[in-house]
Image (spheres, grey):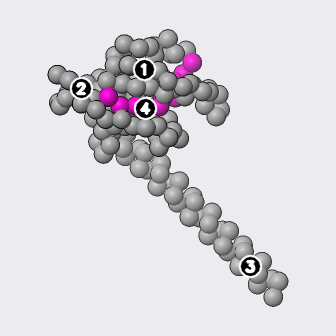
């Protein structure tokens, strides 16, 4: 009886691990797909929020608010969080215009289009992603 209980617990644990692994793989594939399908644009930094070192300490997680200037359509505001290499922190300042990519599924999600920064996927759902049309 004890052997059967242990076997059941092991099967449940292995099944849970397999499901978690598949979800991680799907999440990574979704992220890669979103980056590949994102549309190029420019965005001006209008606010810099909280900054924290990333988990491994090699980049700084920075909350940013942008005025996004899409090639077609009206400018709008959005918040994002990027992982930035410490040497490029001086490149991140209010008023700075940066190349970005707009997520084709969620236009409020703004990916960096610079080699020294990457989107902070861990904070995507934490941020209040704001969309507002700006006056003409």
Residue 32 seen in the figure: yes
- Residue 7: give x, y in percent of width and height: 74, 79
> In front of the other: label 4 or label 3?
4
Marks 2 and 4, how far apart at CA? 18 Å
- Residue 5: give x, y in percent of width and height: 76, 81
Tell me which segment is drawn in magenta: 77-86
Q: Which mark is residue 80?
A: 4
Residue 112 is left or right of residue 6, and the answer is left
The quarter of the picture where the C terminus appears is: top left
Residue located beneath label 3 in the image: 7
- Residue 55: give x, y in percent of width and height: 64, 34
Residue located beneath label 1 in the image: 47
Residue 121 seen in the figure: no
Is residue 103 a member of the stretch shown in magenta? no
Q: In the figure, residue 103 lies in which quadrant? A: top left
Q: Does 121 appear above or below 22?
A: above
Describe the element under mark 4 as helix, strand or loop. strand
Dot 3 or dot 2, earlier in sequence: 3
Identify the residue at image location x=31%, y=24%.
67
Q: Tags 4 and 3 in contact by the CB under 8 Å rule? A: no
Describe the element under mark 1 as helix, strand or loop. strand
Q: Which mark is residue 134?
A: 2
> In front of the other: label 2 or label 4?
2
């Amino acid at each position: 009886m004890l052997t059967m209980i242990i076997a059941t617990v092991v099967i449940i644990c292995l099944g849970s691990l397999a499901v978690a692994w598949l979800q991680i793989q799907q999440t990574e594939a979704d992220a890669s797909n979103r980056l590949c399908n994102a549309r190029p644009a420019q965005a001006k930094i209008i606010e810099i929020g909280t900054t924290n070192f990333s988990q491994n300490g090699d980049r700084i997680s920075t909350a940013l608010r942008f005025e996004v200037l899409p090639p077609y359509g009206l400018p709008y505001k959005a918040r994002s969080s990027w992982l930035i290499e410490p040497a490029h922190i001086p490149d991140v300042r209010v008023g700075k215009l940066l190349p970005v990519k707009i997520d084709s599924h969620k236009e409020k999600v703004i990916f960096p289009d610079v080699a020294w920064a990457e989107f902070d996927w861990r904070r995507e759902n934490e941020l209040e992603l704001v969309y507002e049309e700006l006056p003409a």
